Amino acid sequence: MIRLFKHYVPNAVLLLGLFDLIVLAVAAEMGWVIRAGQIGMLVEPVYMRLPQIAVFVATLETAMIAVGVYSAGALQSLRFATARLIVAVSLGVIFQATIFFLLPELTFWRSNLLYAMGLSIIGLIALRILLGKTLGSQAFKRRIVVLGAGTRAQRLKTLSQTPGSAFVVVGYVSMSEANRVIPEAIARDAIYNLADHVVLLNASEVVLALEERRNSLPLKDLLRIKTTGVHVNEISTFLERETGRVDLDSVNPSWLIFSDGFSSGRMLSSAFKRLFDIAASLVLLALTLPVIMVTAIAIKAESKGPVFYRQRRVGLYNVGFDIIKLRSMRQDAEVAGKAVWAEKDDPRITRVGRFIRKVRIDELPQAWSVLKGEMSFVGPRPERPQFVEDLEQKLPYYAERHMVKPGITGWAQINYPYGASIEDARQKLEYDLYYAKNYSPFLDLLILIQTVRVVLWPEGAR
């Protein structure tokens, strides 16, 4: 994997993205040339059209990222990828139309754009037909050796067999575990030189997956492996990189303290984040005011009660604040103010409420909380005080998610479907800790772009 601004990108995804950029640029130029030839227009040198080509490529690539063209599902299924590509190109047309309205000199004419869009779809699908099997082959997967043969090693084995996995396990070494569950593991005593064994397997990385590390770390072996140029990682770091979340089953306080992340030297990025929140919340409130007003009328017409719903949430440093949402449930949804988890097909949700929850319209008034500085656009979702008290008792490190400002959307929201249980909260906490640990403006931008996918395909919305 390649690390970009503290966030890991699989090699196959990065390579495919670079090829896509080339295909889009070629499609944009060919669209212009074809249309110019049809009307007898002189074709000027390509550098005269670089701004328009750059905008075309940037808008379509952004749309492709937004709808999940580079997700594991799209990399594994051509049908899935084709459907997402068509949606992405359609979304790109909307982006291009918006830019044409604001800065017409930076976009193609509609006739040029039609050809460029058609060629883009053909080129992008053809590229995936040609590279489909290659991208999922062993050539792009890292070869790792696992030191351990217990339940932690089994987790790595299971992860390596999931579709879209970026690594393959080429060997297991049993380190005298009492609960050995990997039958093919080779006993450490049967290997004369572990470093030579790793090199012979052509491994690029060794992952330490011991069940018990006290007085059992093979320091001499690890040092020799490291000096051969092979990376050595423990399972917590490895799982963080491969899954995009902090694995609560393997982490310990010392790992959180000494591992990379939770940087305090981000004053400039925090200031930029706040300026973006102010500007974006003002624009969003201005643009969506008609939508909010129409929705408010629909809510009032369907059921009795206030249009807006205030709810107490826990924010930065455990400070409470009130968020404002468009009411999507009956007025008597919570008796005596007692917090209740939302359920699938929750009967308390109104017909209007079900729709606005699916398309996230009910969240729009939260832009006011962002403007006031109580929330950010990107961050862990703020929870009810009653839930927080319960979750802090049951989940380790839950309080640490309150060390960053809560947000309207977040890393957990784009990676995990809506959940309303302790286990769902645990899964989302792992993503929230990853965000808090690896925050960067790049990660914020990635989350904002991919939120489009969550709105278009609202999986699990309740």
Image: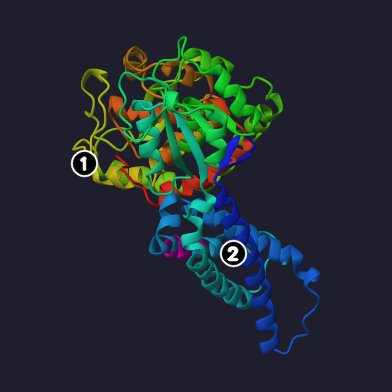
Q: Which residues are magenta?
A: 82-88
The crowd level at tag 2 (other Cα within 10 Å; few <14, some 14-19, many 20+) is some
Camera-nearest residue between 128 and 144 = 144
Quarter of the figure with the C terminus: top left
Say whether residue 99 is visible: no
Q: Main secondary structure of the magenta part?
A: helix
Local crowd at mark 1 within 10 Å, few (<14), some, or many (≥20)? few
For this rendering, which residue is in front, 454 or 376?
454
Label 1 SS = loop
Nearer to us of marks 1 and 2 is: 1
Residue most extreme to the top:
215
| Of the pair 65 and 40, the residue shown nearer to us | 65
Which is more toward the observer, 88 or 104? 88
Identity, as a three-letter code, of the amino acid under mark 2: Ala
- Residue 6 badge: none
Q: Position of residue 53 (x, y in %)?
A: 69, 66
Answer above or below: position of 23 versus 394: below
Q: Is residue 307 left or right of residue 435?
A: left
Q: Position of residue 7 (x, y in %)?
A: 58, 37
The residue tagged 2 is 97
| Amino acid residing under circle 1 | Asp
Q: Residue at x 62, y 33 (%)?
A: 440
Q: Residue at x 54, y 74 (%)?
A: 118
> Is residue 161 magenta-colored?
no
* Residue occupied by mark 1: 345
99 shown above or below 394? below
Name the spot of residue 12 as percent of width and height, x first: 54, 52
Q: Position of residue 114 (x, y in %)?
A: 57, 75
Is residue 432 among the parts visible in the rendering? yes
Q: Quadrant of the N terminus?
A: top right
